[in-house]
Amino acid sequence: MRATVNGSTASLDEVTAHTNALDWLRDQGLTGAKEGCAEGECGACSVLVARPDADGSTTWTAINACLIPALSLEEQTVITAEGLGEPGDLHPVQQEMAVRGGSQCGYCTPGFVCSMAAEYYRKDRVPASDAGSEADEHGAHECGPNGFDLHALSGNLCRCTGYRPIRDAAYALGIPEDTDELVQQHSQPAPAPAHTDVTVAGARYVRPQSLAEAIDLLASDDQAQLVAGSTDWGVAANLMMSRATTLVAIDRLAELRDLTEDETGFTIGAALTLSEIERRLAGRIPLLDKLFPQFASRLIRNGGTFGGNLGTGSPIGDSPPALLALEASLLLAGPDGERSVPLAEYFTGYRQSVREKAEIIKAVVIPKPLAAHTAFHKIAKRRFDDISSVAVGLAIDLSDGVVSRARIGLGGVAATPLRATAAEAVLEGRPWTAGTVREAAAALADAGTPMSDHRASSAYRTAMLRTALHKFYVETTSVQEVSA
């Protein structure tokens, strides 16, 4: 068993199922990447991996090495900060970080360099002057004049230098030359997933070749744990010493990685990463376009999936409120075949759902027509990379100023994500006015059973529910006034 790291072969023999990629890389003497938090929050462990683009070619993707199992890298290609450049021959990203004072203590620097390099090599990155009006719209995402999207660094923390020199380094980067070795690999097929099946020290790691094989594994082993991007399981393994006897990796299963659109709606594979979904949709579902920038960080979105976010059953997952507002349903695959479950009926209790033990979320289905007016409001202590205190997904249609359809999804206010059906009922069939919104906001404030914890008090959560609808009303009426 092996992987390619910085152009050389590295052995994965005798690596356990629960050894993360960061620890394995450091055991190889590649100590640039660091463990700062062990939960994917600081980005000090960031490395580059070769991942498939929609057409099968290679795209360089930054990931949190502290979260993924090292065995998931079998037959894959990895670049660490040491592989980008070396003393006397720095990579352009390293050079700009050095000359612009982007590094002080240096602990976080290799992670920043790898995340910055992933954006440096983004295939569709072009200077703002070459992108026209599209680049101007993307300016809301904080793009520099060179097309560098600062969201690429949203998962990297610096505790001593300050971010301005790091931003200056990012904005000073040019477009890589065609002769750059990593650019040349763009046109090459990305490494295919290996059919890994290894047991070391009593723990088994399996990468099945098909969905049917994955389902059989779950049906035959009560202790089997599904892993995809490992953005949830990796935290449990690092901080709570969670040790499943069998890990079943489904992140590269072809049956879980389709994204299709037809006249009835969108079908989004459960193992596509959030970054992949964002790129492939290209704004075709506006509510998801509003969700993505607020969902953790780019590093997390490069690994995290809808399947994982919904599979954990967490009441504070970011995607359920938006997907509930979109009236999404889930396609579940199990030993008895496939079945469709409306997301509004999927959650049954705290981290519990109707999904059976041997079932796998195959896809998220979002029906058409999409609502004309949507919003995603996330209330959290930090702008990026934080857990929400309250999250609200909103979607309404108006006909001659009257609400013809209203869907509101909530997170963080009950043991499960839920639909605010009482507030929806107040809105539907009523004029979209401040008076109607006040009445619906009162009903929305009564939704769920908000609790007090270290993130927010029950009273604050209730106030934020009420405020969300008022804010949405202002947003939609302002858009209508501008359009008129």
Image (cartoon, rainbow, N blue to C red):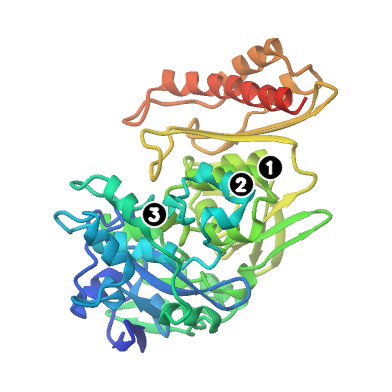
Asked if residue 51 is positioned above or below residue 365 in the image, the reply reads: below
Residue neighbourhood size for the residue with mark 2, other residues' Cα within 10 Å, grouped as few (<14), some (14–19), many (≥20): many
**Would you identify the image quadrant in which residue 136 lies?**
top right
| Residue 326 numbered tag | 1
**Would you identify the image quadrant in which residue 298 lies?**
bottom left
- 2 and 1 marks in contact (CB < 8 Å): yes
* 419 sits to left or right of 198: right
Disc 2 marks which amino acid? Leu
The location of residue 385, given as percent across then percent down, is 39, 45
The location of residue 355, given as percent across then percent down, is 59, 55
- 3 and 2 marks in contact (CB < 8 Å): no
Residue 419, visible in the rendered structure: yes
Q: Residue at x 64, y 12 (%)?
A: 438
Foreground tag (3 vs 2)? 3
Disc 1 marks which amino acid? Leu
Residue neighbourhood size for the residue with mark 3, other residues' Cα within 10 Å, grouped as few (<14), some (14–19), many (≥20): some
Disc nearer the start of the sequence (2/1): 2
* 388 sits to left or right of 45: right
Regarding mark 3 in the picture, which secondary structure is present there?
helix
Quarter in which the N terminus is drawn: bottom left
Q: Which residue is mark 2?
A: 288
Q: Which residue is mark 3?
A: 171
Regarding mark 2 in the picture, which secondary structure is present there?
helix
Foreground tag (2 vs 1)? 2
